[in-house]
Structure formats: C-alpha cells, structure tokens
Image (tube, coloured by chain):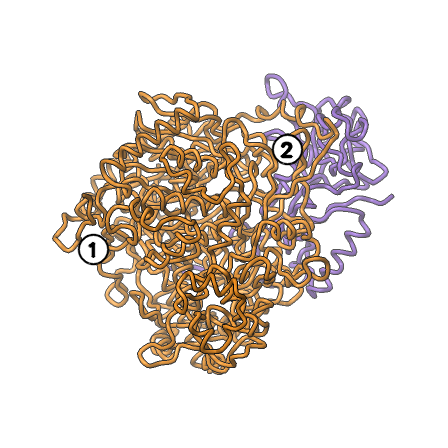
Chain colours: A purple, B orange
C-alpha cells in the first residue's frame, strides 16, 4: 500500500484545462463546482507559469484536524476523503486548507452552503466501492478499479502526474536530470535566477 | 440558355467600394452615434449564464458507471483538432458513460486537452438541434425529415431550374469524415456546380497552395511525433498550447530530451511563447519581412546549406536578390523586430540542425498569405532542413479532418485528390465512378464545369454582388451550410444582408449555429440535425497525413442522421441517387461507409490515398500499441514496418502494402519504405533551367538522378513495362495507352513498377523557390489592406484589384484609403483552448462553457489608458467596414502597444444585442458572445481568397 500524491510540473503545464474538464466528465461535477483549477502566475508576461491545483491529499491534513463533525479521514492509500452524510457545510475545512480545495454547492435560500465537495483522488467515498450511491455523492472510484485519477491520466503534456509517491518522485527526478535543471519546483527561480529567454522589450512599439 | 458572364465590359462598382466611401467619410458622425447607442445598451445584461449549481444535478443518477455492468469499449478519434487523439469510450446499454485515456495511441499517449477530455458530453447533447425545423412566420416549427427533404429539395430545384445550378452553394465541412467529404464533393458535381468549399479556405488554403507549389504536396511534411528529433523548433503564427495542446507534449519532449531550442515568433505573447527559449515579437502582417530578415543573416554569413541548394533547390539566386534588400535596419523599420535578436535566432537555426518550422493561421490569414507560406519554405530549404527527420515544415492543420476534407476535394477548385478542374480530371473520375462523362457534363451550366467556383470566404459577394460582376450565370440564391460556422468568416454585417437576400437558407449541423439567428428572416430557413462523428464510423486524416478509423460510439441522438445518409436522401430527391451510389451498398438510407472508402481508394492516385483500405485502417487502430512513439513505425507484429495510419502517400493498391510515408521528401529511405524526392510537378525545365534534382535521389533508386513523373511511355522507354502484369497492362491500354500516367492508371501498375525500381511515381525534382505562376513569383512583403503604417504603403503596396474565383476582389482601392486615423489599433484574432471554430459545439458543452463565459478583447495597458478603458469594463471595438462589437476589455501586456486581440469562437450576440431568443427552444449554446468577425474586415489572399483576419485595424472605445 503506497501513499498517493499529485505532482504538477510547472515546466510542462500549459493551462489547457484538460484536468479540469476530465474531472467534470468523470465525476459529473455540476456547474459552479470545480474540484480542480489551473492557476496561472505572471499571466501574459515573460515568466508566465501555470500549475494545476486540487486537494493535495496532505499527510498532515489541516481539514481533517478542524472538521467539527469528524467526517474527513485518510484512506489506507493516504487519500483524504470525507463522508458527506455527516457534513454540515460549516466551511472550517475551507479556512484550514492551504490550497482552497473544499467547494460548497449552494443549498436552499440565503446562500446557505451545501455539503462540502472536493477532489477524491478519484477514490469515491465511504460507501461501497463503485456503487451507484457512491457515484452519485462523490463521483467515480477509479482507484477501486485499479486506475489513477482521470485528470492526471489525461493531462495533455503529462505535467500533472498522480500515483504512488515513490513512483512519482522517480518520474520527476528523471525529468529533472534530463533537463539539467528544475525550474518547475517552487522557489527555483528565486534561488538560481533562471532566465526565461528573450522577452519583448519594454515599450516596444509595433 | 445560361452562359458564363463576361467580365471585360465595364461592370458597376463592386458593392464593397460603396461601403468604403461611407466608412472613410462619415467617421466622426458615426462615432458620435455609436457612443450614444453604446450608452443606451449599457444596461442590457450580457448574456444569461446559468446560475451556479443549476445544471446537471440529475444527470449523475442515469449515468452511474456500474448500471448494467456490461461495459463495451469503443475506440474513436477526437473531433476537435488535427492532432488526432484517440478517444476510448465506455459504452453501457448504448449509453456513453465514460472516457478512458487512450495510452496506446502514438499521437496522444493517453493525453487530451480540455476539449478532448470533454467529448463525452456529446452523449448528453442537451443543446443539440434535436429534429428538423423550419422558420415559418418568424417562428421555429418542428417538421419531419420527409417534409424537410421535400421542401428544401423543391426549393433548391426551383432555383436550379430558374437560375442554374451555380445559384446554389454547397458549403461542406472539415468535420466530415473522409468518406463524407468525398461523397459531398461527388454530390456537388452531380448537382452541377463547383460552388462547393469548406473551412480549409479560411484556415490553410494559402499553405496548401504555397507549399504544394514549392515542392509538390500541400501538407505537413513530417509529424507531431517527429518533432522529438528536432534541435530547433521555430514556431511562427501559431499557438499550439491553446490550439493543439497535445502537440505540446511532443514539443516539450524535444525541448527536454533533445535540448531543442524553442523559438516562438508571434505578435502576441501566447501561452506557447511563455514556454519558449526565445520570443520574437513582430508586427502583424510582416512575416515575409521577418523571414527575409532572418535569412539575410544566414546568407550574409554563408550559413546556408550550399550543397543542398545545388542538388535540390530551383531559383535560389532570385531569392538572394530579394533577401539582400532586407537589411537589419529595414527589417526593424517594417516588422519592429530587434536586429540583434534576429541575428541570434538566425545563428541558433543555422547551428542547430535538424530544425523544424511550424506555422498556423497567424501566417496564413493575410492578403499575401501565399507569400508567407512560401517564405517559410524557402528558409527551411536554405538551411537544408527539408526531407530530414527532425526538420520539415510541420504545418499544424486546424479541424480534425480539415486535411482529409482538403485531400478529398471539398474545394471550389479541385476534385478529390487535387485533380484540377479540367477535362482529364473529369474523365478520370468518370471512369472511377463508372459514369458517362457526357451525363456529368449535362449537369453543369454551359462552360461552368471547369470554372473554379466561388470560395467560401466570398459567398456573401456571390449573393450581394450585381450579377454582371460575377463570372457565373446568376447570383447565389440558395445556401447550404453543411457543418460550417458562419461567424468564422469576416464581414458579418454584410453576411447578415446576404442571408436575408437568399431565397433559401439551409443548415445541416448537430447545432443550429449562428446561421440560425444572425439574420432577420421570417421564412425560408431550414435546420436539419446531423449526427456527430461519434454517432457514425469512418476514416479521418490527422495533420501528419495519417488516416485513423473511427468506430461508432453511440447511435445518432434524437432525430439526427449521419451526413452520408442525408446526402443519400437529397440525391434521391434530386434524382441522382443511382449515379451517386452506383458502386456503394446502401442499407436503408445509409450507404456502407467502407464501400465509400474503397471507392476513393480506386481514384486517389495523386496523393497516395489508394493503399489505405478500410481493413488496413482498422488493423492499425487495433494494433496501435505496436507503433514506435517517435518514428511511428510498427516494430514487429502483423504490421511490421508500416507507419501508423499509413500517412499519405501510401502508394499503389492496398495489396501492395506500401507502409505510408512518415516524412515527405526524405531521400534516405527507399520509396518502398516511404522515401522520395521533391515532386516533379512543374515540368522538367523552366526558361532553359533544369527543374529536376541533381545528384539527389531516394535510397536504392535505379535512376541515380532527377526524373520526370512516370507515364506509360516512360516505362516503355526504360524497358520497365515488361514488369507490368497482363491485367495492369490491359487496364492501362483501355484507358489510353502511352499517355496514361501514374495519376490516371487505375490499375496502380505504373506506381508499382516505378517503386519496384526504387523510383517515386511523381518524379524527382527540385523544390522551386520561384513560383512563376503566382502574382509574386518570389515572395514579397506587402502591407496589409488595412495598415497603420502609411509610410510603408508606397514601398510595399498591395496588389491591383482583380476578378478571380468568379468575384471582383479589391486590393489597391482599399489600401489607398487611410483608415489609420480613425482606426489606430491593429486587430488580430486567434483561439482559446476551451473552444473550437465558431464555437457552437463547444459553447454548448457545460464543462467547457463554464471555463470561458465572456467574450473579450486583449488591449495593451498603454492603449487602454490612452483611451480611458479599464480592465473588465465593456468596450466597443469598431472595424473600418462599419461592424462593431461590445465586449469586455482585458488589459494585458500579452499584446504590444498598438495591437489588440480577440478570440473568434463566440457568436450569438450581434453589435450589442443578444440573439438568444432567436434560437430554437433548448438549442441555444450556454455561452453566447459577440463574434470577432463582426468587426473584422475585407481582404483576401491574392491566390486562394483566404480572408485577412490576422492584420486589420480597429478603434476601441469605452462603452
């Protein structure tokens, strides 16, 4: 039994949103709820970088610690899941989460929050694996079918990868060795001042 | 008797000129007026978007993956772009319930972009056109298929009777499968017109013409996968990170594993440019100047491949003369590109080989687009990058089957296989169709059978122009949009008028499209629901010339029918079903798709679409995992040595088992394994200069020199005719004996024997850098029609006005007006990753629509501040032809000062008004928006009539 992780390679991500739509498709996620998003920094200027973000399935997950009804838990694979039946939509997990992963559908009047929804690493929920009930509440349980999350499986440039932490580390390590540098990791540019090539000249008038 | 109109008598002024006068003259008044109307419309909501959480709540219950438990996997191909990504569909009880990654595919290795990852939405199809409808008294009325075919058929036949067959325009599609595209062209021929065309006209027609006239074939020379082998990737006028995202997997792989330098030349700092080692910004519409500027450094320093040029290039000295004029200073004056950067780029390209050159619509959509595409080719020839793995001109086509629809002749100027409109071509196809040529002739108006039709970019002029100005008997009165978004074309205000002037307007499409709502007609509009490619089967040609076979995923939804079935119904109505489907089995109303493939296999000798039988294609899909992910070649297994999808040319008959040709013009391989020289398409000499290759020939060739294309007479001369079988000889004799060539020999014998001796059937010649049949034999820079640089017009003027492709076409009489004072900002356009084409399909898909809900214009900070525009505010973008769009401002340095950009996928708003109410109930796309082409302008390529959308002018004002 491994520890499941996502990793998004900032040198590969092109903000194509395949991960976002793959997630919608696989889990029938309704309009307005996005379990996964692509964040772009320095949009439109040299140094532009994109990264796909969802629940990171933390080992020391703050959401698990703050949940007042104790419905958020770790599976044997290290995936963070929750039991919607006990969720009261209080929003504590949203405050605690460093990645903005928890989502809340609108329920009833006055904007009241429905039960929290987030990325399940395509691992469903506490119900019987691949039951209709599980699908309706959480989407597909691909892990139970021996498959990985669809967002990573369909990533256009293989930027987003998912799987056992050891294997993901091997794949990424190999990429870094091949490239000879790692500007994909957070903080690399600050440390090594890596240049992104000749950009447009300031004030260049066409 | 209808006869062809003469054009040398003085015709009335083209209607475009009248528009110009008003645009130049009354600018101040109109601006005041527009500002007022802008305020008036300010309160109107910008399109109703679904409230959060209100869609698809119930959908999950019906599609629980385990329901039924019996899951069938269907393998098909994404219908969005030309990469050709395999889609693995999970189907349960006839319902498409899931999508799995297609890891076996050498093209996408499991990957998709946003569009590909969302194709299962087709199975929901909530916003589809669900049944035939007609507009009656301003209201949509549901009708049956019988009524639809009868009424539309009667109306079109009445037009044909009264005004001739050329008064109905058959607008086909890059969304057809190869079989449907072929049948469509055949159908139009039997209707009796060459007024047939499709999206290729407005996407890569200048590529096809420019490239084919340089070295023989107008297609991507290598493949997406072959980019793995490149040391330099020079990308100009393309944004694959949004338009072909999965191709970036191959580009980034070259960058990482091969240490390839990625150079992106584009007026806009695109998402692709953000991944580049070198971003080269230049002014829209100055591609030739930029390329000559790079080549200037190459030639100045002697970095060109002199031996390659001697052996394989014709006319290079004339290129040297032109390039010598493009000194770094002049290049900077015209393009704005920094001299030191151009030198660095030139050095990078010269010292890292092989290098590939990629372009897309940023290069093609110009009034001198054919010059751009040829200049790119010349640069690659100078560097010796053609015909080598890792090199080539990797032209990324747009739609999933725009390559196939082009190859199969859904074009106003060719028959399937690029057989030109000439007697010999008709004779050839009449033989394939087993039809009497005289009967075919009788279908056309006199003299029109070999007359190039009106291109799709100009259909509106075919309607609005005085008939005295048209080179056809009458104006266009019936228009059939068979899988085409009208908002992908410029001059929408005029298109609206044209639609209103038509007698009959027909849409055959899975969606109503903007055609259903743009006009204010109350009658005479018909919407017929077509099935998507997921609801039928057939072959599709990816950008790299590989064919793939699509399995049917689900049955046609609602009352929709596949295109080939609809063609059958109309052929039946028009009385030529027996001729159209003479050798094709018909089951009920549906022709057998495989029989159509087999029929075009029998006739497509010119480009080697003859070896890809349906059986071989299905085998390739089944054994996808046997193919190498870089070379595309099968390693072992039953298909050992074949290239995936048998990229054309796949010479000879299917029985010959030619493997296909992965990289065009590669002389390092025998022809039997996909090698070849350049095509001998332009004769053996020009003005006394040899056009055939020298000291260059494919590996293993028995003729160790250049040679012309093969004919029966040539085989006899070489003594190789004895290698023909009796059957082959008989076929050749029955067609015409010695005069029969590799293109007209229906037995395939000439091709087979030539290849047996190591020779390419089409000859072995030099590439020509001087196309003496084109307006500019050597590619020249010419300022766009709507240029902001009045100081350059005298030095680099556009063309003289002329009439070609049946319509008067203006160049000089537009450029001589100074629009730049009233319209000071350059306007260009492009794609967004979530949407495709006119966007009707993708904007109807909630998973995609949610990601891009608003039409916008990108404006540089400086321009925004100069014009009092704030980020996110509504603005009016005015075009010099009088069109205007109300969109959101996005302030960004992605565009340079003086340049604005709009995506072209939106539709359903027109000049500030939402047209949502005009769609049939429940078939309105989720997201509507203004079409960039409402503000886009006149301007057409001097060879192909490509529209000029990448360099025009606009004025942007706060709304």
Q: Is residue B458 left or right of residue B600?
A: left
SS category of the residue bearing label 2:
strand
Marks counted in the figure total 2
**Is residue B619 in view?**
yes
Q: Nearer the viewer, residue B362 or B485?
A: B485
Q: Position of residue B949 (x, y in %)?
A: 36, 51
Residue B331 x/y as whole percent: 37, 70
Dot 1 falls on a residue whose secondary structure is helix
Quarter containing the C terminus of chain A: bottom left
Which of the two residues, B639 or B867, is positioned nearer the viewer here? B639
Q: Which residue is mark 1?
A: B813
Position of residue A140 relative to residue B87, above or below, is above
Q: Quadrant of residue B528?
A: top left
On residue B96, which mark appears? 2
**Residue A42 x/y as whole percent:** 56, 51
Neighbour tally class for label 2: few under 14, some 14-19, many 20 plus, Cα within 10 Å: many
Is mark 2 in CB contact (under 8 Å) with mark 1? no
Protein chain holding label 2: B
Query: Which quarter of the picture shows residue B686?
Result: bottom left
Residue B746 pos. (x, y %): 47, 59
| Residue that lies at the very extreme toward the left in this rendered image | B10
């Amino acid at each position: 039994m491994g520890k499941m992780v996502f990793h998004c390679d900032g040198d590969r991500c092109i903000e194509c949103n395949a991960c976002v739509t793959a997630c919608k498709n696989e889990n029938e996620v309704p309009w307005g709820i996005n379990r996964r998003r692509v964040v772009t920094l320095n949009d439109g200027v040299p140094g532009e970088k994109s990264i796909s973000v969802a629940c990171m399935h933390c080992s020391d997950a703050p959401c698990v610690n703050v949940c007042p009804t104790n419905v958020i838990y770790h599976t044997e694979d290290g995936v963070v899941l929750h039991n919607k039946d006990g969720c009261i939509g209080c929003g504590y997990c949203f405050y605690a989460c460093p990645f903005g992963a928890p989502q809340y559908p609108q329920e009833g009047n006055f904007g009241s929050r429905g039960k929290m929804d987030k990325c399940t690493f395509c691992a469903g929920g506490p119900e019987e694996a691949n039951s209709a009930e599980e699908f309706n509440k959480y989407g597909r349980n691909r892990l139970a079918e021996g498959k990985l999350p669809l967002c990573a499986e369909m990533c256009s440039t293989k930027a987003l990868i998912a799987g056992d932490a050891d294997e993901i580390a091997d794949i990424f390590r190999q990429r870094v060795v091949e490239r000879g540098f790692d500007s994909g990791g957070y903080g690399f540019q600050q440390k090594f001042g890596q240049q992104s090539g000749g950009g447009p000249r300031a004030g260049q008038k066409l | 008797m209808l006869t062809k109109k003469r054009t040398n008598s003085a015709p009335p002024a083209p209607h475009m000129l009248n528009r110009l006068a008003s645009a130049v003259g009354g600018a101040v008044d109109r601006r005041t007026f527009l500002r007022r109307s802008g305020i008036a419309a300010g309160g109107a909501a910008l399109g109703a978007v679904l409230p959060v959480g209100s869609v698809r709540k119930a959908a999950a219950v019906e599609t629980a993956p385990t329901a039924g438990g019996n899951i069938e996997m269907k393998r098909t191909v994404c219908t969005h772009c030309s990469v050709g990504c395999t889609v693995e569909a999970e189907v349960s009880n006839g319902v498409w319930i899931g999508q799995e990654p297609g890891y076996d595919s050498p093209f996408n290795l499991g990957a998709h972009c946003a569009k590909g990852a969302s194709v299962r939405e087709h199975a929901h199809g909530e916003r589809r056109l669900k049944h035939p409808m007609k507009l009656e008294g301003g209201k949509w009325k549901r009708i049956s298929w019988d009524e639809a075919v009868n009424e539309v058929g009667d109306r079109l036949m009445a037009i044909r009777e009264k005004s001739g067959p050329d008064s109905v325009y058959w607008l086909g599609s890059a969304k057809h499968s190869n079989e449907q595209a072929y049948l469509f062209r055949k159908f139009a021929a039997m209707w009796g017109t060459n007024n047939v065309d499709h999206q290729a006209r407005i996407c890569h027609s200048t590529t096809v013409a420019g490239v084919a006239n340089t070295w023989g074939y107008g297609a991507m020379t290598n493949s997406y996968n072959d980019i793995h082998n490149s040391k330099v990737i020079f990308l100009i006028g393309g944004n694959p990170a949004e338009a072909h995202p999965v191709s970036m997997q191959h580009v980034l792989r070259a960058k990482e594993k091969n240490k390839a330098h990625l150079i992106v030349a584009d007026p806009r700092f695109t998402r692709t440019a953000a991944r580049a080692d070198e971003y080269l910004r230049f002014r829209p519409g100055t591609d030739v100047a930029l390329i000559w500027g790079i080549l200037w450094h190459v030639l100045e320093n002697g970095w060109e491949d002199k031996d390659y040029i001697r052996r394989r290039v014709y006319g290079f000295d004339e290129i040297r003369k032109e390039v010598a004029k493009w000194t770094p200073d002049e290049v900077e004056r015209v393009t704005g590109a920094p001299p030191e950067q151009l030198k660095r780029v030139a050095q990078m390209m010269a010292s890292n080989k092989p290098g590939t050159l990629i372009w897309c619509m940023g290069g093609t959509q110009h009034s001198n687009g054919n010059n751009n595409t040829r200049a790119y080719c010349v640069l690659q020839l100078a560097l010796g990058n053609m015909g080598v793995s890792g090199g080539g001109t990797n032209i990324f086509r747009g739609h999933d089957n725009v390559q196939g629809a082009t190859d199969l002749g859904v074009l106003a100027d060719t028959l399937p296989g690029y057989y030109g409109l000439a007697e010999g071509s008709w004779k050839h196809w009449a033989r394939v169709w087993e039809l009497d040529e005289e009967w075919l002739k009788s279908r056309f108006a006199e003299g029109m059978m070999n007359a190039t039709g009106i291109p799709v970019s100009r259909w509106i002029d075919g309607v609005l122009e005085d008939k005295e100005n048209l080179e056809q008997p009458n104006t266009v009165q019936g228009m059939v949009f068979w899988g085409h978004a009208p908002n992908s074309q410029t001059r929408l205000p005029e298109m609206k008028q044209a639609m209103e002037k038509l007698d009959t307007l027909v849409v055959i499409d899975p969606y109503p499209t903007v055609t259903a709502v743009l006009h204010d007609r109350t009658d005479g509009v018909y919407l017929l629901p077509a099935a998507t490619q997921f609801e039928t089967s057939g072959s599709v040609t990816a950008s790299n010339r590989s064919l793939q076979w699509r399995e049917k995923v689900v049955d046609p939804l609602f009352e929709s029918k596949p295109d080939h079935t609809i063609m059958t119904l109309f052929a039946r109505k028009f009385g030529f079903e027996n001729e159209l489907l003479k050798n094709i089995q018909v089951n009920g109303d549906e022709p057998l798709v495989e029989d159509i493939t087999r029929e075009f296999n029998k006739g497509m000798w010119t480009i080697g679409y003859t070896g890809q039988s349906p059986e071989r294609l299905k085998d390739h899909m089944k054994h996808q995992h046997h193919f190498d992910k870089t070379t595309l070649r099968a390693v072992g297994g039953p298909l050992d040595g074949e290239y995936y999808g048998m990229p054309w040319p796949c010479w000879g008959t299917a029985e010959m088992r030619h493997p296909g040709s992965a990289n065009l013009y590669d002389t390092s391989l025998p022809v039997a394994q996909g090698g070849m020289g350049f095509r001998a398409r332009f004769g053996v000499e020009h003005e006394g200069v040899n056009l055939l290759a020298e000291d260059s020939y494919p590996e293993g060739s028995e003729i160790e020199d250049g040679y012309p294309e093969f004919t029966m007479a040539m085989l006899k001369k070489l003594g190789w005719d004895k290698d023909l079988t009796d059957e082959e000889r008989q076929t050749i004799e029955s067609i015409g004996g010695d005069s029969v060539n590799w293109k007209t020999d229906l037995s395939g014998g000439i091709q087979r024997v030539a290849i047996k001796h190591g020779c390419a059937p089409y000859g072995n010649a030099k590439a020509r850098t001087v196309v003496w049949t084109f307006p500019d034999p050597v590619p020249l820079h010419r300022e766009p029609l709507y240029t902001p640089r009045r100081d350059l017009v005298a030095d680099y003027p556009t063309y003289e006005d002329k009439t070609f492709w049946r319509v008067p076409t203006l160049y000089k009489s537009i450029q001589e007006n100074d629009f730049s004072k009233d319209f000071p900002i350059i306007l260009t356009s492009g794609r967004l990753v979530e949407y495709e084409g006119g966007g009707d399909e993708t904007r109807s898909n909630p998973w995609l629509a949610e990601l891009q809900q608003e039409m916008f214009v990108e404006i540089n900070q400086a321009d925004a501040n100069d014009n009092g525009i704030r980020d996110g505010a509504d603005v009016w973008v005015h075009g010099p032809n009088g069109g205007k769009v109300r969109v959101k401002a996005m302030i960004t340095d992605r565009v340079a000062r003086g340049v604005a950009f709009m995506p072209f996928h939106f539709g359903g708003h027109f000049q500030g008004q939402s047209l949502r109410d005009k769609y049939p109930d429940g078939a309105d796309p989720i997201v509507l928006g203004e079409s960039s082409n409402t503000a886009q302008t006149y301007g057409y390529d001097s060879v192909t009539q490509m529209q000029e959308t990448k360099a025009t002018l606009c004025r942007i004002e706060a709304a």
